[in-house]
Image (tube, grey):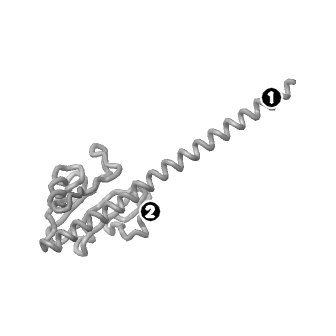
Amino acid sequence: METTSKKKLVIRIILWFIVIVVVAGFTLEYVRTKKVARDSIRIHNLKLVQYFLEDYFLENQTFPVAEGALTAEEGLTSCKIAWNELNQTLTANTGVLLPEDPGQNCTTKPYQYIYRSNGADYKVIATPEKCEWGTDKNILDPARPCTKESGNWAVYSDGAQNW
């Protein structure tokens, strides 16, 4: 009788272990999927901002000027009031809003979009959660290449490539 109860106990422990492993696996996959989804949205958003900038340039022969550095502290970011002004300038006739980063939290950074332009050229950068996911999307920032720790994605005009 005692060996039967020991066998049952061992089976229960094994079953609980299997349940925990399965739940952990689903949780890890869920987290990875969420990161991939946010990075996919970032790619789409960068291309959307690029479209609005190029469209604005066709009508005005200039890009909206924002000369701060391409940093969260100094640049025109999606966390600052100036982003709303840029939004109004670029999308006045469309009723569409410029996107914000899907992971945007303006107090902790780095998930926000940063824009710079001298009027003749522009660059918009974003910090992905996993930089190499953008390798085949033609959005890697040549001035801030992907490494294990960091890197940025960007859309830009030819003259702003190395900003």
User: Which residue corresponds to the image point at 31% horizontal and 65% vertical from the top-left?
Assistant: 47
Residue sticking out furthest to the top: 1
Residue 41 shown left or right of residue 65 in the figure: right
Label 1 residue SS = helix
Task: Report which residue position mark 1 lands on.
Answer: 6
x and y percentages locating residue 163 in the rendered image: 24, 67
| Quadrant that contains the N terminus | top right
Mark 1 packing: few (<14 Cα in 10 Å), some, or many (20+)?
A: few
Q: Which amino acid type is shown beneath numbered disc 1?
A: Lys
Q: Residue 86, percent across and down?
A: 17, 58
Q: Residue at x 64, y 39 (%)?
A: 19
Residue 4 relative to residue 86: left or right: right
Q: CA distance from mark 1 to mark 2?
A: 49 Å
For residue 155, side relative to residue 27 (left or right): left
Name which quarter of the figure residue 87 lies in.
bottom left
- Taking the spot 67% from the left edge, 35% from the top edge, the residue there is 16
Report the residue marked by disc 2.
Answer: 133
Question: First in sequence: mark 1 or mark 2?
Answer: 1
Q: Residue at x 40, y 57 (%)?
A: 39
Residue type for callout 2? Trp
